[in-house]
Amino acid sequence: MKSKGKGIPLKLSSSESGFSLLEVIIAILTITAFLTGTLQLMAVDALYKVRSERQAQANFWIQEDFEDTKFLASTLDVKSVPANPNVSADVCTNIDQGYATALRRQLTATPLLTTPIPEEQLVATREIVGKNYSLFRTFNIDNQSANPHRLRIEYKVKLADNEIANDYQTQEKDERSEQEGKFLAKSSVEVIPDASFECP
């Protein structure tokens, strides 16, 4: 290598030359592919974080309503003063008017002599991470006469009727369809009012 002046090379040898155009294009394509994959993973991760936050809040909502229901069940008593209008005088002896029926009347605000008591009830609608969802209670009254004091409740949190599933539709689109059983959250519980243990 020839140099002029203070040791600055005038021409580089072929082994010391820079990147070729092909090498630069391959490097750009490799970086682009890596960044595209990373950005897609970040987008999917964000969607799953929103979904999991919605599910957690829906489960807390179900738990909150269940705690309120247990409190109502603990206040039911045929001996209460003033008398509870949802509890019949023959609550312990009439299997059709057991404490489970009294609790259903209390939860649905159905007067004592009114029949039938609704089997499904919209509890409330609230916003969960930017979307409105509805909480439903379904009273499972199969074999109610065999267990007149035990009430089975199934909770479902699903997309509210006025909401449109416009983000990640494959997950939320099916939540309105009860046949497929896709809900944001679902739980089944049993409640036995405390006063029922005093029945013979």
Image: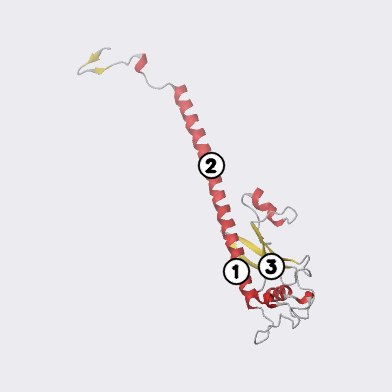
Viewport quadrant of the N terminus: top left
Q: CA distance from mark 1 to mark 3?
A: 17 Å
Q: Is residue 179 above or below residue 1?
A: below
Q: Amino acid at mark 3?
A: Leu
Q: Quadrant of residue 4?
A: top left
Q: Position of residue 36 (x, y in %)?
A: 52, 37
Q: Residue tagged by mark 1? A: 67
The residue depicted at 70 percent of the width and 83 percent of the height is: 85
Q: Nearer the viewer, mark 1 or mark 3?
A: 1
Whichever of callouts 1 and 2 sits on the residue coming sooner in the sequence is 2
Residue 122, label in figure: 3
Whichever of callouts 2 and 3 sits on the residue coming sooner in the sequence is 2
Secondary structure type for disc 3: strand
Q: Is residue 32 above or below residue 171?
A: above
Q: How is the image coloured?
A: secondary structure
Q: Amino acid at mark 1?
A: Glu
Q: Amino acid at mark 2?
A: Leu
Q: Residue tagged by mark 2? A: 41
Viewport quadrant of the C terminus: bottom right
Secondary structure type for disc 2: helix
Residue in front for this viewpoint, 55 or 17: 55
